[in-house]
Amino acid sequence: MTDCNTARLHPDASASQTVQWHPRPDSRLAEPQEGSWSIEAIQALLDKPFMDLMFQAQSVHRAHWPAGDIELATLLSVKTGGCPENCGYCPQSAEFDTGVKAEKLMSVQEVTRAAQAAKDAGATRFCMGAAWRAPKDRDIEKMNALIGAVKGLGMQTCATLGMLQPHQAQSLREAGLDYYNHNLDTAPEYYQDVVSTRQYQDRLDTLKAVRNAGISVCCGGIIGMGEAPVHRAGLIAQLANLNPYPESVPINSLVRVPGTPLADSEPVDPLDFVRVIAVARITMPKARVRLSAGRQQLGDAVQALCFMAGANSIFYGDKLLVTGNPDVQADTALLRKLGLSGTRTEVAAG
Ligand code: SAM
Ligand code: DTB
Ligand code: SF4
């Protein structure tokens, strides 16, 4: 994060009102000590009476972030489909018949055009996704050109390219990459039920390489893959106990894509999804908690509860990677209705 404390308070894009916002001192609402969360303590939070949990999450949120500030991050699939991994949730795996065709890496011109459009619509972060298991060094060189172009527009850059080696992370950092997205997705105990082409430790190793290269970490997971409540607690424990915990935490609700092994998963109870957001906020007070994939299924009221629970970031734009997302007009209307506004600059959370 930068240390610029300027937050924009008004949903009207033409308004220029800005304020200096200073976080209050840590209110000790997030006990136990950061970095030492047990699964039991997280489970106890998940099991709290709903209103108590919401009150605690909103209290933690207000102690660390300005009210009403929502980060808008736009996604672009710069290299779609044909992935050799078999992640059971993913429409881009070559193993599953989902109708997604393998494409080549997009050009600098195409990506710059998309990033400019995202910026014009109000996004501050641009996240480029590639359906790779692990990029080759020549892929990193091409990505570096895309990162440089997006950075040149004055946007925060994020990429999600699969497993990285330390020298590749370093190279991306030198090209101007601000964030790397690499999700743990679920608890270690449930991981092999979801993907068998890699290990949980592979994910942790990439996260370490990213952190060591000085890139901020974006790491979260997916709810609704048939996991038990203890696996949700296990995922949050893994994330919250990373040292330091991620700067961005995307919480996805599974988009059930026909043709993927998880297409027939039981839909998540929306209130259970809100609970996971609340517990992410409580355990990782200074992280941007992103209400991520699956917003089309949630509806306005549940999304409002997610913001109440402490979500302060969304994927913004008509498409995620290959599936749909609420359109920009719907999101603008929702934010306006709730008195929320897209952040213009990163807010330092103390
Ligand atoms: N190939 C890279 C990787 O796996 O890290 C980057 C792209 S991958 C699509 C990024 C993340 O998208 C996954 O880790 C997963 O959390 C999320 N994702 C993929 N398919 C999803 C789905 N159907 N529903 C919700 N989230 C999904
Ligand atoms: C994340 O946690 N969710 C985004 C982003 N990081 C890369 C991806 C969501 C993908 C949803 C299904 C799709 O469109 O492929
Ligand atoms: Fe490939 Fe990433 Fe999809 Fe897994 S989630 S199949 S690694 S694109």
Image (spheres, rainbow, N blue to C red):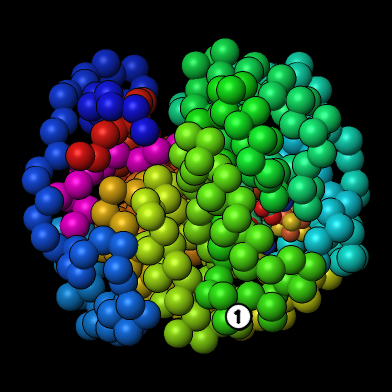
Q: Residue at x 10, y 43 (%)?
A: 24
Question: Compared to 97, does 40 lie above or below?
Answer: below
Query: For residue 20, what is the image quadrant?
Result: top left
Any magenta on residue 233?
no
Up the image or down, 300 lies above or below 274; here it is above
Is residue 122 visible in the rendered image? The answer is yes
Side of 298 where 48 appears, left or right: left
Residue in the picture at 46% in, 39% down: 216
Seen from the viewer's position, the closer of residues 96 and 157 is 157
Q: Is residue 339 above or below residue 29?
A: above
Query: What residue is rendered at 26% in x and 34% in y?
Result: 348
Rendering coords of residue 178 (x, y %): 50, 31
Q: Looking at the rendering, which quadrant does residue 16 occupy?
A: top left
- Residue 306 is situated, as x and y percent measured from the top left of the image, at 36, 60
Relative horizontal placement of residue 178, taking residue 134 as reference (left or right): left
Q: Quadrant of the C terminus?
A: top left
Q: State which image quarter holds ligand 1.
A: bottom right
Q: Is mark 1 within 8 Å of ligand 1?
A: no
Pinpoint residue 298: horizontal percent, then vertical percent. 49, 64
Tag 1: residue type? Tyr
Q: Residue at x 14, y 63 (%)?
A: 29
Residue 71 among those drawn in magenta = yes
Q: Nearer the viewer, residue 291 or 33?
A: 33
* Nearer-the-camera pick, 300 or 285: 285
Question: Which of the two residues, 3 or 96, is positioned nearer the viewer here?
Answer: 3
Q: Which residues are magenta?
A: 60-72
Q: Which residue is mark 1?
A: 190
Q: Is residue 95 left or right of residue 79?
A: right
Q: Quadrant of the N terminus?
A: top left
